[in-house]
């Protein structure tokens, strides 16, 4: 488990090598939220602006996209994380019951797992016996080894939903800033493109600090995605046009 040290591990092992906890629902939702908000709304804003309907229509479309997308992302994240957590909790309940009712079988199961990993039979037997001595340790070990789960970190549906809502809105408002500030026409479109491009570069560069990919690569990749999405939808809007009565 990231952020926790096994009881058997010397403290000095961890002093010089600390991992970031990047598996939580909030982190994942935040990363996808701000990127999705930016790409989704720049596509909507530029697609609408391409039809030249007037700044008011673009503002309305952009705000509808921002709030609609934020609520949709939050609801989707909550339902997804809630369902996932319920599935995990069910599997853990089953595992807990099996440890209580069939401890010998579960101990042999652990032995087999460790032997498959190259540990000799006697050592695997001693490790499994020690781990099975405490029900909570046994549950955590079986959850990790059999299910690939950490019982203490199943993800928070509320955290994921809130992070998704806020970060999507932050990303989505960027292309709208010029239109909300009173600009219109070509000037507003140019500002929307400039602000979106700068934000895409910043997001890509920031993510590179987490992923450890080259900053230029991450920044340009983020910019490229926004550029493709915005240019395609702007072209569609310009081709379709709109008649304002």
Image (cartoon, rainbow, N blue to C red):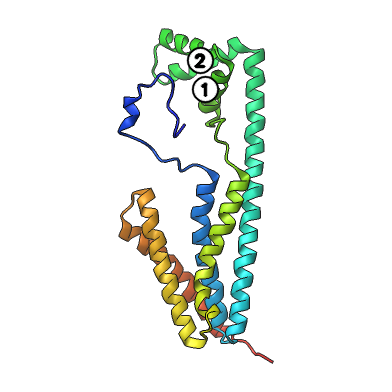
Residue shown at 42%/66% (left/top)? 199
Can you tell which mark lies on residue 141? Answer: 1
Give the quarter of the figure containing the C terminus: bottom right
Splitting the image into 4 quarters, where does residue 147 fall?
Answer: top right
Residue shown at 65%/15% (left/top)? 100
The foreground one among 198 and 236 is 198
Count of marks, rendered view: 2
Splitting the image into 4 quarters, where does residue 218 fall?
Answer: bottom left
Q: At which x and y percent is residue 41?
A: 55, 69
Answer above or below: position of 89 versus 106.
Answer: below
Residue ranking furthest to the front? 181
Q: At which x and y percent is residue 215?
A: 32, 57
Can you tell which mark lies on residue 170? Answer: none
Residue shown at 54%/24% (left/top)? 140
Residue shown at 44%/76% (left/top)? 193
Can you tell which mark lies on residue 131? Answer: 2
Q: Are marks 1 and 2 in contact (CB under 8 Å)?
A: yes
């Amino acid at each position: 488990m990231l952020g926790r040290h096994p009881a058997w591990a010397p403290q000095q092992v961890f002093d010089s090598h600390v991992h970031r906890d990047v598996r939580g629902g909030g982190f994942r939702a935040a990363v996808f939220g701000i990127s999705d908000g930016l790409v989704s709304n720049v596509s909507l804003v530029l697609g609408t602006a391409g039809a030249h309907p007037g700044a008011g229509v673009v503002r309305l479309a952009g705000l509808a996209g921002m709030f609609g997308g934020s609520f949709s992302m939050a609801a989707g994240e909550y339902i997804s994380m809630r369902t996932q957590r319920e599935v995990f909790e069910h599997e853990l309940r089953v595992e807990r019951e099996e440890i209580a009712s069939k401890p010998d079988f579960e101990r042999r199961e652990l032995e087999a797992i460790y032997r498959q990993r190259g540990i000799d039979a006697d050592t695997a037997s001693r490790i499994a016996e020690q781990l099975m001595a405490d029900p909570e340790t046994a549950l955590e070990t079986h959850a990790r080894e059999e299910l690939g789960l950490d019982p203490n970190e199943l993800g928070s549906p509320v955290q994921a939903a809130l992070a998704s809502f806020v970060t999507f809105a932050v990303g989505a408002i960027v292309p709208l800033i010029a239109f909300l500030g009173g600009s219109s026409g070509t000037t507003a479109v140019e500002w929307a493109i400039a602000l979106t491009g700068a934000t895409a570069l910043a997001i890509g560069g920031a993510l590179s600090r987490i992923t450890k990919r080259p900053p230029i690569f991450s920044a340009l990749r983020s910019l490229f995605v926004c550029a493709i999405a915005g240019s395609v939808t702007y072209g569609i809007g310009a081709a379709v046009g709109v008649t304002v009565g």
